[in-house]
Image (cartoon, rainbow, N blue to C red):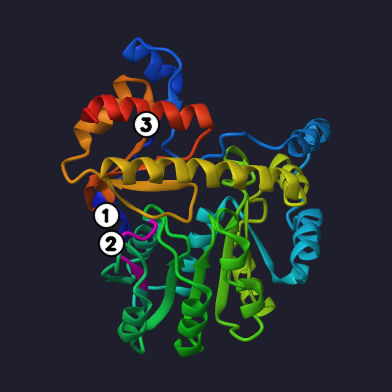
Amino acid sequence: MQYLDRANAGVKALSPYQAGKPIEELERELGIKNIIKLASNENPFGLPPSAKKAIQAQLDNLHLYPDSNGFYFKQAVAKKFGLQPEQITLGNGSNDLIELIAHTFASEQDEVIYSQYGFIVYPLISQALNARRVEIPAKNYGNDLPAFLKAITPNTKLIYIANPNNPTGSFSSAVEIADFLAQVPPQVIVALDEAYVEFTEPNERVDSFGLLAKYPNLIVCRTLSKAYGLAGLRIGYAISSTEIAGLLNRVRQPFNCNSLALAAATAAIQDDEFVAKVAENNRIGLQLLQNFFDEKGLRYVPSKGNFVMLDLQQPAAPIYQALLRKGVIVRPLAGYGLPNHLRISIGLPEENQRFLTELSDILGL
């Protein structure tokens, strides 16, 4: 039996996600110690102490199912941002929400618009659903929103925008986003993916939650994997109109967020001091890397995330491998159609400096 023939048409052309090896296994294979990982945009501080305490308090209740509605977490989010709990949809990370939105609104006869070099899940979920994928060429490695508007047809159902964008770090301003939303037909759903919003300067952020009252076709996705340090627990949330949230919750799995994730997220979302420390470390580290690249004449895309994309102007794979042999893991981007580029996550000060030292040695800078 050829089960490939039995798969959905959109699934047949997909390839399984190629996960990296655990650090411990890489250290064993390469015969080195003290590998640092600057590949996955993770929080170098780990999870906040407030979240650790909340997890500890939940350990005796793990024989019980989690609260499917995430009551306390939704209350904390609603209070922090001036929202209604009924506007919130829980996700197993924002990745889960991106897929949930597609499953709710997109089907084979529909078009899904996203940017070249946008988050790779957008085309993957669209293909899995056999929806028509409309990829808009990037402008300066970012979202060309006027071109998005021109691409809208009567069959357009869903638009994904990552802001800041992963993996390029590009950013669309508040004015650009508001102008774009004003021109999108109300029947077209816009999913604004703000996984890295906490790393942008407060005075330049889009008032995305404020825009919801004017644009009920807008869905804002956020995660606690990055600035809040909960990547291993997988929890995120979407904010939308109550009508859209009700539709998403028809599709959402009842227990898609586990008890430890909910407890940790409820504590972390209120921990502004921790997030401020993370953001400040990121600001300093990002500036260090970008200043170094400027000094050495290396090309990069100015970033608004907790990472920076370096253009080596030559195949990046050999340099990635050379860094790996020196115990520094970064992210090659050939899978995004960027074979000359590496994405480097911002780490602790000593990790950032080690990366720069090893890169200098490899490139003879």
How far across and how far down the image is residue 17, in percent?
Answer: 36, 43
Q: Is residue 81 left or right of residue 127?
A: right
How far across and how far down the image is residue 276, in percent?
Answer: 68, 48
- What residue appears at the point 50 percent right and 35 percent down from the top-left corner? 347
Asked if the magenta segment contains residue 21, the reply would be no
Q: Nearer the viewer, residue 19 or 355?
A: 355
Residue 12: mark in rendering: 1
| Number of numbered discs visible in the structure rendering | 3
How far across and how far down the image is residue 280, in percent?
Answer: 61, 45
- What residue appears at the point 33 percent right and 14 percent down from the top-left corner? 29
Q: Badge 2: how crowded within 10 Å, few (<14), some, or many (20+)?
A: some
Residue 356: mark in rendering: 3
For the residue marked with disc 3, what is the amino acid?
Leu
Pointer 1 and pointer 2: residues touching (CB < 8 Å)? yes
Q: Nearer the viewer, residue 38 or 173?
A: 173
For the residue marked with disc 1, what is the amino acid?
Lys
Give the residues drawn in magenta, as a range: 113-119
Q: Which element carries disc 1, helix, strand or loop?
A: helix
